[in-house]
Amino acid sequence: METVELACEKRAIRPKGLINRLRHAGRVPAVLYGNHGSATSIAVDGVELKARVSTAARQRIIRLKSEASELNQKHVILKEIQRTPVSREILHADFYEVDLTKPIRVEVALRFVGRAAGIIDGGILQPLVRQVEVECLPLELPEAIDVDVTALGIHDVIHISGLQFAGNVKPLYDSDYAVVTVLPPTVAEAPAAAAEAAPAEGAAAEAAPAVGEKSEKGAEASAAPAPAKKG
């Protein structure tokens, strides 16, 4: 697992307007949670943080750079970010300190690779989960778990027990749940049947006189004068 650096500094939590001033200065307010439940309010460089989040490996190990000795060289992982609803700018971040010598439990993204055989027959690849929880040492944390779907036919399923985990990475699960399948093609009503039914209905409509109208024979009969009565 690659280690990247992120500049940070301790920040005050008062006064209330300080957070807005931090954001205007290009900093993002954050909280660092320590190994023993402690929490430290920090601020990180917004440009650097955005670059870390935009990468595929969001769970990569980050080494903090700071003039504060209690923060400098700490290894952390990014656990959560908050964004603005419209612009999607980062408003806040949570970091968790990790000990490089102790296993951690995190969720890792699944990466589906290959073209499923069932797609050739009209099927649709349907991922059922996007992440799996694993346990491993921080530096062994994978960027993603590859799931090869090449052999999947329609109705076939890959379960978590069928995934390949490198090295000492151990998946954590209580039941052998499905992670991906191939759905059958959607069956639509044949358009030809509808097209054949339409002329028959139209022909019936022409054969039957509309309400309030008479057939041609009926019209001729009504137009002929009635025979005179003898008297």
Image (cartoon, rainbow, N blue to C red):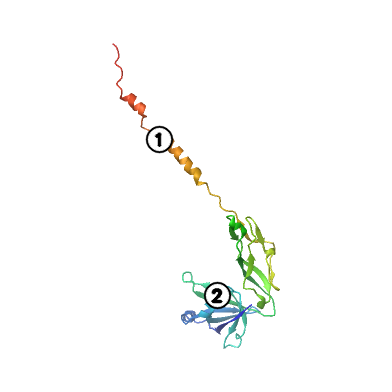
Please report the residue visible at 54 percent of the width from the left and 81 percent of the height from the top.
44
State the SS at label 2.
helix
State the SS at label 1.
helix
* 59 over 196 or under it: above or below: below
Left/right placement of residue 119 relative to residue 212 reads right
Quick one: label 2 or label 1, which is nearer the N terminus?
A: 2
Amino acid under label 1? Glu
Kindly identify which residue carries mark 1: 206
What is the crowding at mark 1: few (fewer than 14 residues within 10 Å), some, or many (at least 20)? few
Please report the residue visible at 57 percent of the width from the left and 76 percent of the height from the top.
94
Observer-side mark, 2 or 1, equals 1
Residue 222 found in image quarter: top left
* 147 over 15 or under it: above or below: above
Which residue is at the front of the view, 59 or 14? 59
* Screen quadrant of the C terminus: top left
Q: Where is residue 120 drawn, in percent x and y? A: 59, 57
Kindly identify which residue carries mark 2: 53
Which residue is at the front of the view, 168 or 191? 191
